[in-house]
Image: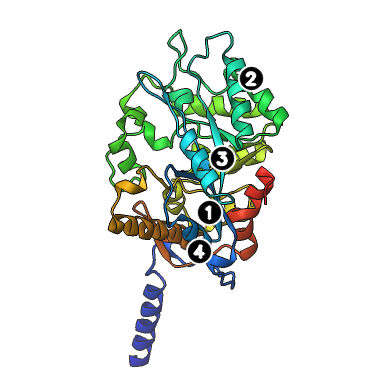
Amino acid sequence: MKNITCFLIALTLIASSCKEKPKHEQELEPNKVTVDKETIKKIDVHAHFHYDRDYLPAFFNEWNMQGVLVDVALQDSTDIRRSWDEYVALANARPGMFWLCSSLIGVGIDDPDFAEKEIARLTDEIKQGAKMVKVWKNFGMVTKDASGKYIQIDDERLQPIWDFLTEQHIPVMAHIGEPIQAWRPLNDPNNPHYGYYTQNPQYHAYQHPEIPTYETIITARDNWIANNPDLKILCAHMGSMSHDVDMIAERLDKFQNIYVEPAARFGDLVGQDPQKVRAFYEKYQDRIMFGTDFGNNTPQDSLSTTELQEERAALDEDYLLRWKYLSGSDTVEIRNQRSVGLNLSEDVLQKVYYQNMADFLKVE
């Protein structure tokens, strides 16, 4: 009897030890590949370094990385604000380190020569080095035409511009819409977007019922993609579908001209089943890129030596955390979401971090 009791206790201990880790922290089957971050060439496809830093050359060299400086056109009460001139200056000051992405906004779309003027401007900026053109969530959520209607990305008045970019073989980076949480109450501090919408309530659509629905904006985005099958489109932030890799996969299967990158949405990925996310990366390894949304907004001469050192250390930590998530298998936490790394193979990492974007932009 005593032996049977000991046996049952042992079985109980074994069973309980197997339940120690929650689902999102269960280890993935290892690829048995150990990759140093320096050995994988990288392109951060979504960067916002507005100002130069003395440490940038060494930093990018240590990470074996180049970047794309992505311009954003912001509409305020008096004008359209951009960072284009700053980015051109930085790219020229650091040759070989950055490529440029221009931008497009719908302000003035009712003017009969709107498309003509925008094409002329984009022509000049392509000559200055623009490899892509970004469209932002102003389409669908902010900018209105003369009738007071929100301008959606599939508006037919924009079509001459898409035709021009297709002819010029210039891709579009599309940040259309927001994470679905923008249309939900902001009452969960563990929401990966809690901080952003707390600080930027103008984009928290839940508080602004006049803003079109998530479904309306995503449908317009899908219509635009379908209407331009020869236009290469990089859907930033996982196409504003980062909460559900199945939803992203559905679009990748449907539209062969689109690609995705996760900038500022790694928290959404970490919040999902790691085995499912890893399978997504493996299946679509030729169409996923690496982006961060990292950058700076302060001139170097307004920061102290200590502040610059802290800035660089924080930047290195942020890049390293995302490297650990993609390449490792240890527990990671991003924006209050906790899971384990995807442990992607070296071949997949090479594509995601570099080759896919190099092919996309036709650069080396």
Quadrant assignment, res 22: bottom left
| Residue 44 in picture, x, y percent from top left | 53, 50
| Residue 241 visible in this rendered orientation of the protein | no
Classify 10 Å Cα crowding around label 2: few (below 14), some (14-19), many (20 and above).
Answer: some
Q: Earlier in the sequence, mark 1 or mark 3?
A: 3
Label 1 element class: helix
Residue closest to the eye, 168 or 144: 168
Q: CA distance from mark 4 to mark 1?
A: 28 Å
Q: Are marks 3 and 4 in contact (CB under 8 Å)?
A: no
Residue type (three-letter) at the residue carrying disc 4: Glu
Give the label on residue 159, or none. Answer: 2
Question: What mark, if any, has residue 100 been given in the picture?
Answer: 3
Work out whether mark 3 precedes mark 4 in sequence or the reverse, and give the earlier one.
4
Q: Which residue is mark 1?
A: 277
Q: Looking at this view, is 66 or 195 the one in front?
A: 66
CA distance for labels 3 and 4: 21 Å
Residue at the spot of label 4: 62
Is label 1 in contact with label 3 (beta carbons under 8 Å)? no
**Residue under the image location 37 percent in, 78 percent down:** 12
Taking 160 as reference, is 5 left or right?
left
Residue 36, above or below 50: below
Identify residue type, mark 1.
Answer: Val
Q: Nearer the viewer, mark 1 or mark 2?
A: 2
